[in-house]
Image (cartoon, rainbow, N blue to C red):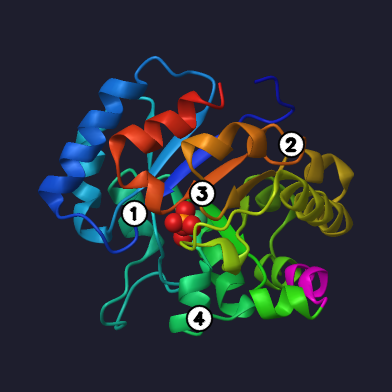
Amino acid sequence: MDKERRLIIAGNWKMNKTVAESADLVNGLKRELSGVKEVDIVVCPPFTALSEVSKAIIDSNIRLGAQNMSEQNYGAFTGEIAAGMLRDLAVRYVILGHSERRQYQKESDALIAKKALAAHAASLKPIVCVGETLSEREAGQMKAVVETQTRGSLAGLTAQQIEETVIAYEPVWAIGTGKTATSAQAQEVHAFIRQILGQIAGEAVARKVRIQYGGSVKPANARELMGQPDVDGALVGGASLEERSFADIIKNTI
Ligand code: PEP
């Protein structure tokens, strides 16, 4: 697929997979995807499996991501993980502000922005998630919600940092529900997010930022979604838990 920006497809394993299961999955992906040069491939296992997966992907085309991190650098923050600790395991990306964390941990845009700054300071690339709920969409608030989240979650970042940030547009009503946004719905919001990025960081930067779509991405819909001009990849939940479906999503976009 000929795209303006290089596609980035990331698997968010959420709270699934033991260490042994994680190693099995990533070893299978390595075999399946070793020839893929056109797409940035990222897997985001649970924290407990990062070390094992990190060792398994040395010298492969698969990169490592985490699902969250602290906005703090070190110290008395029981249960938290700092950006530097992730770097220590050769983690390159970190998902921030996933809708599940916004909902269950009540993460705010301001907190997500602090985390994004801490991630960049440690040379980690944040994947910042934004997206509206079904009731917000039905109330005609989709653009207002996405704009507030995008501006708030990137507050304080330099244009250079924004260029090195990945945005994931994930309509909450499409996550884990089997309901996918149509490619036209996704393109509309992606183009809108790029317009906001242009206002924040300038047109040249906005043209370089990769915006992933997330929400029930499967092998059958990946090609059409990623064929949209402003859709630069996918953040995949359920379908990233199996070697066949995650590999096929990637292969179907080449
Ligand atoms: C996600 O949680 O980021 C996600 C997109 O999940 P799913 O693919 O299962 O809808």
Pointer 4: residues within 10 angstroms few (<14), some, or many (20+)?
few
Q: Residue 131: x and y, percent?
A: 65, 66
**Tag count:** 4
Is residue 148 in view?
no
Instruction: Give residue 202's position: percent from left, percent from top.
Output: 87, 49
Residue identified by numbered label 1: 13
Kindly identify the amino acid type of the residue bearing the numbered disc 3. Leu
| Residue 72 appears left or right of 229 | left
Most frequent secondary structure within the magenta stretch? helix
Mark 1 to mark 3 CA distance (whole Å): 10 Å
Q: Left or right: where does residue 230 sit relative to residue 98? A: right
Q: What element carries label 2?
A: loop
Which disc is residue 103 wearing? 4
- Label 2 belongs to which residue? 228
For image coordinates 14% across by 51% down, the residue present is 19
Q: Label 3: which residue? A: 235
- Disc 1 residue type? Trp
- The residue closer to the viewer here, 19 or 70, is 19
Q: Residue at x 47, y 34 (%)?
A: 249
**x and y percent of residue 146 in the render?**
74, 68
Q: Quadrant of the C terminus?
A: top right
Residue 188 located within the stretch drawn in magenta: no
Disc 3 residue crowd, few under 14, some 14–19, many 20+, Cα 10 Å = many
Kind of element beneath mark 1: loop
Q: Which of marks 4 and 1 is nearer the N terminus?
A: 1
Bounds of the magenta segment: 140-147
